[in-house]
Image: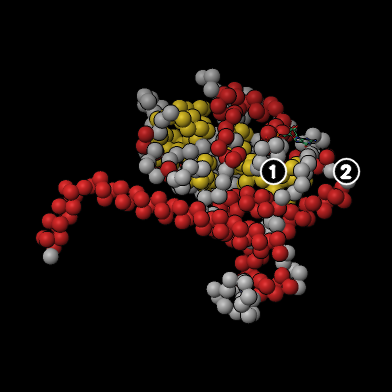
Amino acid sequence: MNSPFSTEISRHPLADFGWDDDWAAAFAPYAAQGFVPGRVVRVDRGQCDLVTPEGPVRADTEFVTPHDPLRVICTGDWAVVDPEGGDPRYVRTYLPRRTSFVRSTSSKRSEGQILAANVDHAVIAVSLAAELDLGRIERFLALAWESGAQPVVVLTKADLVPDAATVAHLVSDVETAAPGVDVLAVSAEEGHGIDVLGALLDGTSVLLGQSGAGKSTLANALLGADVMHVHAVRDVDGKGRHTTTTRNLLVLPSGGVLIDTPGLRGVGLFDAEAGVGQVFSEIEALAEGCRFHDCAHDAEPGCAVLAALDDGTLPPRRLDSYRKLLRENQRLAARTDARLRDEMRRVWKARGAEGRAAMEAKRGRLG
Ligand code: GDP
Ligand code: ZN
């Protein structure tokens, strides 16, 4: 196999990069006009690298760089690209996103930044070499759920835990903090659990987690099982851009792709109320049983959440963590609103006397 674009005639050349029937259907109107589909590998300096059925393409992103930072084209997007022959070739638009990872910029301006699009699985790497911090895991889970991706928690470095019973115990601890989420222990060092994880990761995946959690090692373990395949992807590129192609969008030998962009690693919450709700789905389900629909679960009579605390089915840590993440999220939301107000004020100032006069005149005409 010398190129993933020629090995299997029946498969779409972009199938390895996540192309499926739904993308094909969304792209059909553009195909009819002669446009070419491409998956965005990376975006930089007004251009982007794409994988297309013709191989790697570099294209101008002028038409897909709007003011709204959340709508700027990013890694993982499915682009609509000019057919061959254009110089430069332009990305005309991109297909509606299924999911999107957004980061709150750490500056005073609370503006979101889009980090990756169309991610199916968010792998949250957590080291078993350190003490488990369930609150931190819940934070990453909120972020993952909010993006629309399905999270999976991977407890790394299981070889450093003395015995299997302890590993099982740790897995079940994490499971209580992650309803609806697969939790598995792996050792990249010993190769344990890597195939199980690989089998879970169809479509597009990203790795999240603290520095030192074992993400790079895990990525290598997932990729390493079939080094030939990685080489095959590199071979596609005759233009010396293989390093960028392989750095940000990596084809997994077990199927699917891994997106690895620098920003994703230090990602923070951004407007993730729905995500927080999903992390604490058992609390939200309990709250449905509270007597008052706006129950704050403080001292209200008939509170189902407090009852669950009393009978021990809900660990107090979970409720504390839920409140903490909701508060954090509300602070962020308030900051966003403040920014919007400031922006509106600036706009009105900029319009100045001229604008106001025009408005007055208009009002006069109407009144
Ligand atoms: P990253 O910062 O999340 O990318 O973490 P790295 O992949 O760089 O791993 C951090 C450290 O943990 C490195 O020293 C790795 O060698 C070590 N490490 C990663 N996976 C394993 C594992 O399965 N077992 C052991 N014993 N060490 C591991
Ligand atoms: Zn209540």
In the rendering, which numbered label is found on residue 149? none
> Which amino acid, by three-letter code, is at mark 1?
Ala
Of 49 and 260, nearer the camera is 260
Residue under label 2, please give it.
162
Q: Are marks 2 and 1 in contact (CB under 8 Å)?
A: no
Image location of residue 20, percent across then percent down: 55, 44
* SS of the residue under disc 1: strand
The residue carrying mark 1 has its beta carbon less than 8 Å from ligand 1: yes
Of the 4 image quadrants, the one containing the N terminus is: top right
Residue under label 1, please give it.
125
Q: Residues within 10 Å of mark 2 (few under 14, many from 20)?
A: few
Image location of residue 31, percent across then percent down: 42, 39
Q: Residues within 10 Å of mark 1 (few under 14, many from 20)?
A: many
Vertical relation: 143 (above or below) 317: above
Q: Is residue 131 left or right of residue 304?
A: right
Say which label, 2 or 1, has the lower sequence index: 1
Image location of residue 336, percent across then percent down: 44, 52
Work out whether residue 16 can be spotted. no
Vertical relation: 30 (above or below) 323: above
Of 134 and 93, nearer the camera is 134
Of the 4 image quadrants, the one containing the C terminus is: bottom left
* SS of the residue under disc 2: loop
Q: In the image, what residue occupies the spot 66% across and 75% down?
A: 304
> Which amino acid, by three-letter code, is at mark 2?
Pro
Q: How many numbered circles does the render carry?
A: 2
Work out how far the residue at label 2 is from the one at label 1, CA to CA, in angstroms.
20 Å
Q: In the image, what residue occupies the spot 67% across and 45% down?
A: 124
Q: In the image, what residue occupies the spot 36% across and 24% down?
A: 87
Vertical relation: 176 (above or below) 203: below
Of 297 and 161, nearer the camera is 297
Q: Is residue 283 left or right of residue 341?
A: right
